[in-house]
Amino acid sequence: MTIQIRTIAACLLLSVLSLLSTTVPAHTTGFAGNHQQYPSIEHPGITAFVERGITLSTALFGRPEIVVREVDLRISQPTDANSKLPKGFTGTSLRDREQGAFTIFLSRKPGNIAFHGQLAHEIAHLHNPNLYDVYVEGLNTLFAAKLLASEGLGWGRWERHFRRGGDPFYGESYLLMKELESIVGEQQLGSLLHHAVNSNRSGSRMHIDIDSWLDTLTADQRERSAAAILTRAGKMERARKASRPHYAFYQPLIGLEPTQRLASK
């Protein structure tokens, strides 16, 4: 089904230097209800880009939790200069579950070097917007790299940025996902999203059960993957606490029986 993307011209100058800017979980902070107070995005070819992104994410991760029928793109700068609404963030918001309607907020305008990188990362969040998880942020950043490469758009600048320690919350998780992919392969890494579990009773917040995913691997893959995670765990945990304390990051409890793992968590 063709995705409808509502567009209104948006010409806003934003001077955020990082790739993804300040990512805010828009789907739980009420931004979806206020989405019309942010300007929509008009850009040639943007509808087709989003559709190709969803096709790629489906190929890598499987069918999304909610069928995506409409994606509304907005610049996160309120049209009212005196508005108290947040600004300068990125996020993906589910507006209407039954209609499959989402809003993606971006801090960069079309034409900015980071615009497509931000958008590609948020397209991956359409798969399951209720996931608040460090592993998922890294997976979605890796997805952004793949989508931009398939579109002939540059990623090298951000690769260098992350390898130099830039944006550690995204950088460390992204580099971990690259390492895990080299161990388990693209499809097995994509299956990580199949191991999402509820973080609260309503299911409005979810996280990855990393031990459940590790149990699907061969013994060699499991050992190497757990070692890769634990090697980067310290940096990722510090980055999470510093910038996204409300996100989950469960480290592997490899070697423990399932009942012992549950007790540890």
Image: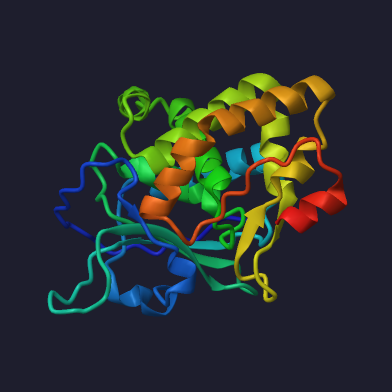
Task: Examine the image and state in which quarter residue 69 appears.
Answer: bottom right
Q: Nearer the viewer, residue 85 or 65?
A: 85
Name the image colouring.
Answer: rainbow
Q: Nearer the viewer, residue 49 or 59?
A: 59
Task: Examine the image and state in which quarter residue 254 appears.
Answer: top right
In the rendered view of the protein, which quadrant contains the N terminus?
A: bottom right
Residue 64 appears anywhere in the view: yes
Q: In the rendered view, does 1 fall on the left or right side of 213? A: left
Residue 147 appears anywhere in the view: no
Q: Position of residue 46 (x, y in %)?
A: 39, 47
Q: Is residue 4 above or below residue 111?
A: below
x 42%, y 77%: residue: 30
Q: How many marks?
A: 0
Q: Nearer the viewer, residue 159 or 71?
A: 159
Q: Position of residue 108 (x, y in %)?
A: 26, 50
In the rendered view of the protein, which quadrant contains the C terminus?
A: bottom right
Q: Is residue 248 above or below residue 232?
A: below
Q: In the rendered view, does 111 fall on the left or right side of 216? A: left
Q: Position of residue 236 (x, y in %)?
A: 47, 40
x 57%, y 23%: residue: 179
Q: Position of residue 84 (x, y in %)?
A: 22, 79
Q: In the rendered view, does 237 fall on the left or right side of 24? A: right
Q: In the rendered view, does 253 fall on the left or right side of 30? A: right
x 56%, y 60%: residue: 129
